Amino acid sequence: MKIKYLKFKNWFLALLAGTMGLQQGCGEIGVAEYGCPEADYHIKGTVINEQGDAIPRIGVNQMRDWENRNGEWCYEDTTDAQGHFFVKNRIPGADNTVYVTISDIDGAENGSYQDTVVGVSFDDATFSGGDGRWYQGTAEKEITVTLRRSE
C-alpha cells in the first residue's frame, strides 16, 4: 500500500510541477511558431518610351533580390498593345522591396530599348487579408516605367 501511495504522490507532484512550469514559461512568450514572413505583391504598370507612347511586347519579370542576384524569377508577363503589364507572387522575407526587370524581347520590331531594373518599395503599402501571424496579406502598387532607346 505504501508503494502505491508513493507512486501516486510522485505522479501527482510531477504533473503539478510540469503544469506550473508550462503555464509560467508559455504565458509570457505566447505561441511559438516557425516560419518566415511572406506577402503577396501585385504590381500593375505601364511601359512607355521617352515621348510617352506605350511600348508593346516588352518582357517584365518580378524578382525578390536583385542586388544579391540570388533570388529566383517569381513571375513574368509581356506588355500588351497599351504597354500594360501585371506581375504578382507570394514572396517570403521581411524585405518589402520587389525588383522588376523590363526587357525589350522583340528586338527592333517596336524599336530597340535599353533593359532596366526598377525597385518597387512596399514599405508604405497597405496590406489586406493577412492572418495576423506570418502572412502579411496582399499589397498592390501601380508604376510607370520609361525606357530609353538603345544607341
Image (spheres, rainbow, N blue to C red):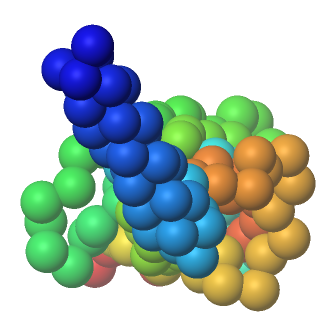
Can you see residue 129? Answer: yes
Q: 137 left or right of 29?
A: right
Decide if residue 142 is in sight here. no
Where does the image place residue 92, in percent across and percent down from the top left? 42, 53
Kindly identify the residue that appears in the image at 35 percent across and 36 percent down: 9
**Residue found farthest to the front:** 1
Q: Where is residue 142 in the image (x, y as percent from the top left)?
A: 80, 65
Q: Is residue 7 above or below residue 114?
A: above
Q: Quadrant location of the N terminus?
A: top left
50 left or right of 3 in image: right
For this rendering, which residue is in front, 57 or 20?
20
Residue occupying the point 23% across, 23% down: 2
Residue toward you, 3 or 142: 3
Where is residue 67? Give x, y as percent. 21, 79
Residue 48 vs 19, above or below: the answer is below
Residue 23 place in picture, x, y as percent: 56, 59
Q: In which quarter of the image is the C terminus?
A: bottom left
**Relative to 79, 2 lies left or right:** left
Q: Farthest residue in the bottom direction?
A: 124
* Residue plotted at (66% across, 84% down): 123
Q: Number of marks in the image?
A: 0
Q: Residue drawn at (64%, 54%), measured in percent from left and top?
A: 133
